Image (cartoon, rainbow, N blue to C red):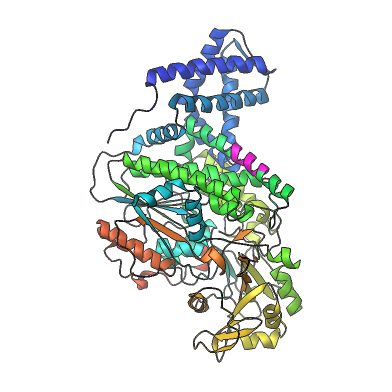
Amino acid sequence: MSEPRVGLRPVWRILIVWLVAAGTLLLLAWVLPGFSIDDVWSALAAAALLGLLNALVWPVLVRLALPLTVLTLGLAPLALNAAVIGLVAGLLPGVHLDGFWSGFAVTAGMTAVSMILTGLLALDDDAVVLRNLTRYAKAQATNETNSVPGVVFLQVDGLALAVLQRAIRDGNAPTLAGWLRRGSHRLIGWTTDWSSQTGASQAGILLGSNENMPAFRWLEKDTGTLFVSNRPRHAAAIERRQSTGKGLLHADGASRGNIFTGDAADAVLTMASAGRKHGRIGAGYYAYFSHPYATMHTLLGVLADAAREVHQAAVQRRRDVQPRVHRGGVYPLLRSFTTVLTRDVIVATLVGDMRAGRSVVYADFVGYDEVAHHSGVERYDALETLRRLDREFARLERAAAGCARPYELVVLSDHGQSQGATFRTRYGQTLEDVVQDAIGAPTKSPGATGTSDQAGQESWGYAGGALEEIAAGPGIAAKAVSKAANRHREAGGDVVLGPESGATDAPPEQRTRAAGDEPATEEAVVLASGNCGLVYLTRDPTRMSRERIDELYPALIPALRAHPGIGFLLVRSEDRGALALSAGGELELASGALTGADPLAGFGPYARRQVGRTDTFTHCPDIMVNSLWDEQTGEVAAFEELVGSHGGMGGEQSHPFVLYPSAWAAPDGDLFGAEAVHQQFRRWLAGLGHTAYDDASSVDEDVRSEEAPMAEVHDRGTPGGAGSC
């Protein structure tokens, strides 16, 4: 299918861009004190040389400075362009530049005018962006036709079904609304496990299993290993445990921006593959930033979104919007990293995938989730991010229409979010404080239980993963960035940026506690995943029973049950099995025997099943805690400093969605758990003619490895954690 011609003819377009660029240089020379041009001919020569250097030199510069692009959250290209301006001034006698910052100012002015001009020439920014995306993907394009439609799964991280429905109603997701109103798609919901977070959900959806993953981060007491789902080496170890080799993407599939690869051979910007040394490391970033238009388009988007965040945070402070959290420091740029930079790279990569005829692609867009964490689930900031992402889906739809192979688009979410003032804001103490007061002994909270005021923990995690991917690649630049990143490496070898970097002062080789060493002095390790808390008592190497806990720490369980910020907790009794406890009641999960009020009342019809499954996990904590859920206000109390949170139960966090083509067969019943979503996706793929998924009714459990070797993770003892997903 031929591409429609957009705007003016190419020759006229080049001529106009050249003349306007020369005019812009003259204007900037008149305005800026450190920049001057002798005459019009010098301006024309400078504009022509700039265009030539952008075409020939820019790709080389980007490859050399790609690590800086990630480290500076997209700002490095602006500095590179300033250097190119300086080179032009050095080559042309009629162009004069005083220094780097003058070149920086010229670059900023040229970039702004270029973007305005591009939009005016095409009269449609969407058309311009799409034209550039498809042009960049031509090298991958195939003319071979395939009657079996390819499928692109687009995950909107953290968007709940109810929030999407209201966004559609209110005009905040016009592309998705159009699909529903035209009848091309259907919208259904599904229910997560107790652990409503990306690690567990993506393991279930992409690999078919999230067994033994009680939360985003968990401690394996028998080895003292702390797992953090979005650390590259941890994600790789988790995938080795869960994978059968026949994940959702195993047959000509591709993973873009996910935690796990889904057994795809081609994985870009994916945590589980970030540390692998192979030819495509950093390919997603390089392929995108090697084109000046894409770079400047994204750069302006990063700067605009950072400014938008500063303004929106100021508005919340001025209006005293509650609840709210601190959003200062470098967070505006961190937010832009997820909402703009990674989004643009992933969209460009998806266009290339479709033009190459890829069979199955799964991409995760984390921008909405990031903004909702800090701004609020349905506040203007988050909905604006959703609107911008919806616009990208329209571009992908248009790109798919121009591909040789037909494509179906599926939009889904991995979990939702629930809002509320945090546990610490409400009660002036963290979950760790409550546990420490009750046991009268030191505790440790590696990662997040409301102890950090710094926003952007999750964004730091993604930035660290991106840096890890580039550092593992070949070439001088990769070696240089790997060396620079060593001071941010934790014991397991992962690059950890932000407030959790350098959680221990010892060098990496001294941070690992080997088997046989003296145990840590802390008697409890307290972890958090949104409004879900995990309490591990370190005296015993295995899970403690309720009776054992009462013997050693008689005040602990009563203190947790009585706390107004805690909805219920899970413990295991030696005689009665799994128990859900609250201030007013006690429920035996196996028998259903109830004493007093039902601790799980209000947490949904699947609550008993969700909690019961978690109890069977090998690494279930000694005590698992879920915060309050206020049905009147619709609020939870996160154990992390987040306005919108997920990871536990209560509210919309457990209710994500799937938006799929209406021609496909509807699921036979409710979809409970991410593993059920995986099986449904396999059935749909098989129904389309993807024969590799004809085994959709079963997965060979025996193929999964029992446990990835702990030596391949290395985070022993209680090292620092990372931002949750």
- Report which quarter residue 457 is drawn in: bottom right
Extreme-bottom residue of the structure: 575
Percent coordinates x, y for residue 403 in the rendering: 31, 40
Horizontal relation, residue 105 to residue 257: left or right? right
State the residue at coordinates (67%, 65%): 449
Q: Is residue 35 visible?
A: no
Residue 138 colored magenta? no
Front residue of this view, candidates 493 and 406 = 406
Front residue of this view, candidates 195 and 180 = 180
Horizontal relation, residue 329 to residue 404: left or right? right
Quadrant including the C terminus: bottom right
Q: Is residue 92 visible?
A: yes
Percent coordinates x, y for residue 686 in the rendering: 27, 60
State the residue at coordinates (33%, 51%): 184
Q: What residue span does the magenta drawing correspond to?
A: 303-311
Percent coordinates x, y for residue 648 in the rendering: 57, 68
Quadrant including the N terminus: top left
State the residue at coordinates (51%, 46%): 387
